[in-house]
Amino acid sequence: MFKLRYYLFSLLVPALFFACQENTNSSQSESKTTQTKEIEEQPYAIVIHGGAGAMQRGMMSDSLENAYKATLEKAIKTGYKVIEDGGEAIDAVTSAINILEDSPLFNAGKGAVLTHDGTNELDASIMVGKNKDAGAIAGVKRVKNPILLAKAVMENSPHVLLSGAGAEEFAEEQEIELVDPSYFYTEERKRALDKVQQNEVTPNNSSAFVDMDLSDYKFGTVGCVALDKDGNIVAGTSTGGMTNKRWNRIGDSPIIGAGTYADNETCGISATGWGEFFIRGVVAHDIAARMRYGKASLADAAKEVIQKNIPEMGGDGGIIAIDKEGNIVMEFNTDGMFRASIDKNGEMQVAIYEE
Amino acid sequence: MFKLRYYLFSLLVPALFFACQENTNSSQSESKTTQTKEIEEQPYAIVIHGGAGAMQRGMMSDSLENAYKATLEKAIKTGYKVIEDGGEAIDAVTSAINILEDSPLFNAGKGAVLTHDGTNELDASIMVGKNKDAGAIAGVKRVKNPILLAKAVMENSPHVLLSGAGAEEFAEEQEIELVDPSYFYTEERKRALDKVQQNEVTPNNSSAFVDMDLSDYKFGTVGCVALDKDGNIVAGTSTGGMTNKRWNRIGDSPIIGAGTYADNETCGISATGWGEFFIRGVVAHDIAARMRYGKASLADAAKEVIQKNIPEMGGDGGIIAIDKEGNIVMEFNTDGMFRASIDKNGEMQVAIYEE
């Protein structure tokens, strides 16, 4: 089905190109021009993040930095190959995120940070821009790749957001891979938890959760946004949440509109940061709404929200996004953000710190 | 402190009124005129809902209808008295919602519907428009008044959204009233669950959750929005979710941006409806964003979202809202919505069906 469509598309391109040349030159109609461009060439692109935080240059060893970059590169290339081959954005997003989830380096899947009680609670969400379909899960303890469960919730349940033990029961029914909770334990995360808890003043002191002096990034959430050759935008986010989180806290990652949003008319977005502020700011949807109703560009909308609104509220973090024309934005107000992209010209970027 | 401010305000009003008369007449400066109006008179108003659904005229006995109306009237008057006396919008919202939560008639607190397993899982959220502070809880089983726990999360934790057992642990620390889960059991809800489950085809059949032929409303979520004499807007929502929900499903009610949103620059909103669609549509924030970035009126924004976008996606429900000028909107695309309001002129409305 897809192949056929692609074949017809190939035949149409040259014909329409010539047919529309005159039209483009002679007519001022914006809608016609836009239509022409879309038919001429549907850009495709992909972007990922591995979390934003207080990582300063020189803080990590070269070998650790290289390990991060190598995993980011592997993930972005894997996702890109899917859309380059004419596959769907949703498969690009899940395959890229799976690589980040399977790495102990990022705060998602294998590398999830520890809660106050020394356990893991994983959150994830995914949204499809074509029909605004969405799936999400919060607080699962045994799901190896939470993004796949979020996708299953979207595709095979009447619900959008499942949580805790119920979400795991659904995972079993869906034959999603479950692991023993010990799978998520890493020495690295235990040390981070110990350090945060040593600095904890009172359980209600919010600074205990975000001590910026800690030489450990707090927000290593992962995410991916892809735009495929059909013009469909998909965004996904997966996280272990915040080190030392309590009371079955849910952050912004599984919240549609806060941590993840996709709409083919505007853009797809995945966020990483201090989740409480991203929820209150309804960050992902706010960026899309500035484009849709305020006619802002993706770059301007993201800049305003991430560089102004979130810091004014007292929070920090970043977002990755792609608009319908394939423009990529990676905006953050922290020292760094693990990130990679392959743009509509096929050019790859892999970065950690501010350039 | 508040009393003093109010006293000074009383002294200022006549002085500013005369001082600004000429200014208003001679100057075209919009900002000055607006400022003058605000100082002259800060409107205050309140609106509540008790859920939207397929309640058709004649379906309920007169005595049941009267019971609904009496409870709605008690709740709206209780909330209104708080702001009329110069109290804060947040106290108006929680006191009105507490009355609806304590009634077995509404799907929140005492009258919460039953899950697939015959238990109760309660969700709630609250947001303050002044500083966009927010608190929410999902999936609690023993909290008598979930809206009070949402308020405590906002005021006394560094988090926005807590869930399940962890949220209840936090409730205990906060000395929020807990009850035995049997408190929430009503014969009415058991019959509703039995009826839905008799009609259930497969666990994954979404129609099982929303059989519109059932002579039972599905969405009896409650909510309140209030604008106080300080110009602060607060919105809150509390629910038992959807009859027969499974897998620790979380709906839109505890999701900031979907079921609840408040921003003093635009409006406060509480939603009730088929939660999955309200999450995907980021309904509450979308209405506010249409006002903020698209310069729409609250009435137009709400109409577009509730009468067009949500039905186009396949969902239904409604919202209540108040904008910063005190304009009230109660928009729904279902047969009816339990609702009441006291507007900026002090006029009360209590209604169930479309007028």
Image (cartoon, coloured by chain):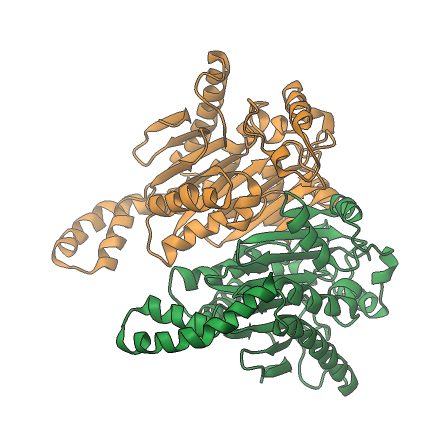
Chain colours: A green, B orange
In percent of the image, x 73 and y 25: which residue is there?
Answer: B182
- Counting from the top left corner in percent of width and height, residue A249 is at 69, 52
- Relative depth, front residue between B231 and B20: B231
**Viewed as shown, does residue A10 lie left or right of A60?**
left
Image coordinates of residue A177 in percent, x first then y, are 81, 56
Q: Is residue B140 above or below residue A215?
A: above
Q: Percent from the top left, x then y, of residue A332?
A: 56, 73
Residue depicted at 39% across the width and 31% down the height: B341
Q: Which quadrant of the figure contains the C terminus of chain B? A: top left
A117 or A113, nearer to the observer = A113
Q: Would residue A66 be found to the left or right of residue A127 on screen?
A: right
Residue A144: quarter of image: bottom right
**Above or below, comparing residue A66 to residue A339 in the picture:** below
| Residue A163 appearing in the image | yes
Of the pair A81 and A334, the residue shown nearer to us: A81
* x, y percent for residue A129: 53, 59
Question: Above or below — where is B323 with respect to A297?
Answer: above
Q: Nearer the viewer, residue B308 or A183?
A: B308
- Residue A202 appears in the picture as rendered: no
Q: Image check: B34 left or right of A208?
A: left
Q: Quadrant of residue A238?
A: bottom right
Disc tally is: 0
